[in-house]
Amino acid sequence: MYNVFLGDQTLLRLLYETKICQYGDLVENTAITFYVLYTMWKISFDLSGSTQHVQQIMEIDVALERLGETVDYSRSAVMTLLIPIFQIGVCSVRILIVWISTSGRIESIPYSKLFQIVFSDSLSFTVMNHFCIYLYALYHRYRRLNTVLIKLQSSTFRDCFVRSKKCLSLAPRTQDRDACARINSCGKLYSMLFKATETVNDKFGLALLLTMFVWLVLIVLYLYYFMEATAGGLFHDVQRYINLLMYISWQVIFSVGIISSAIYCCEKIVKEAKFTSYVVHTIINYNSDVYAVKEAALNLSMQIVHQTPKFTARGLFPVEYVLLLENLNAIYDKSASLFP
């Protein structure tokens, strides 16, 4: 990074001489430098040295086993193998695109700048891996909880059907007490899952904020380069224009992919938590004449209302699909103002 600043190194000016070459490079290099320094500390010390979130996952698994659900860890083992392979592939494609964009002129590539680009991409990829893998683990725990509630819903529906056919007494029975106990256990498990989602916000809030900010800045910056080159008539030189388009497209696609993956994982958990509410209300409707089961399910329903998971970037804005749409609108408005 020191060599990049000292030598004013850039790959973009090999492809196109932009009018904001120094200012654009300064913004990009400064943003990436601060981001790299933060993520190096975050990954090495804050995430790797913390066991709080792992302990919470283990406690959730113990609670699931008490409810008769076991977690398959082999799926996580396969993911652990595939992710580094995928990351190596992403970095290789990045280097390949740089090489193709410069028409194979290896001697003209500033290697300090190339290393800075690949290293920042790798760190961003690693931070998102930590974030998404932890959300992936929570998502499957929410699904296991919903599986327990669905089985409970089926059993209570069957009991209600038998009760109505045989005109049994409405007094609490052993099955009803067991159902109430399982619903209460599901409520405790849901609280543990909600606490784990809050740990995600505490652990990854600032990292998520900086990641989205840096890559959004780069998206706007590189789209400006592309529109400036198009307006300047670079498309008359077809080869240079295609090379510039490839270089910019990778930067934009990678940035959008990083942001979209975080939003997608967050929305998956929120969707699964909302499905929990649907299953609980189904239990309430099926057991409207069984006061004990209905009351336990109502308490769980109220708990879900107050403990719906919500992911934010350090509390500044929610991480959801609406955010992606707002960012795209902001980029479009900015581009329209620069090139009306």
Image (tube, rainbow, N blue to C red):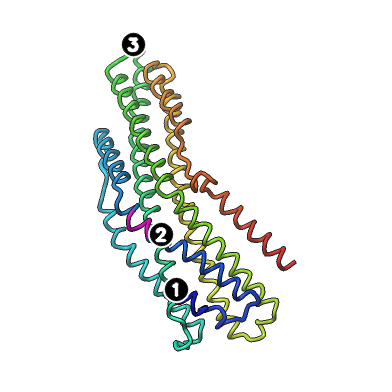
- Which residue extends farthest right? 340
Front position in the image: 142 or 283: 142
Tell me residue 75's x, y (percent): 29, 53
Residue 338 disc label: none
Tell me the magenta residue range: 41-45
Residue matched to label 1? 2
Q: Contact, CB < 8 Å: mark 1 with mark 2? A: no
At label 1, the amino acid type is Tyr
| Mark 3: few/some/many CA within 10 Å (<14, 14-19, 20+) | few
Q: From the viewer's perspective, is residue 295 above or below residue 23?
A: above
Residue 5 pos. (x, y %): 49, 74
Quarter of the image holding residue 93?
bottom left
Instruction: Let me know if residue 43 is in the magenta part.
Output: yes
Q: Earlier in the sequence, mark 1 or mark 3?
A: 1
Q: Secondary structure at mark 3?
A: loop
Name which residue lies at 37% across and 26% down.
157
Pick whichever of labels 1 and 2 is earlier in the sequence. 1
User: Would you say the magenta stretch is mainly helix, strand or loop?
Assistant: helix
The residue at which mark 2 appears reads as 39
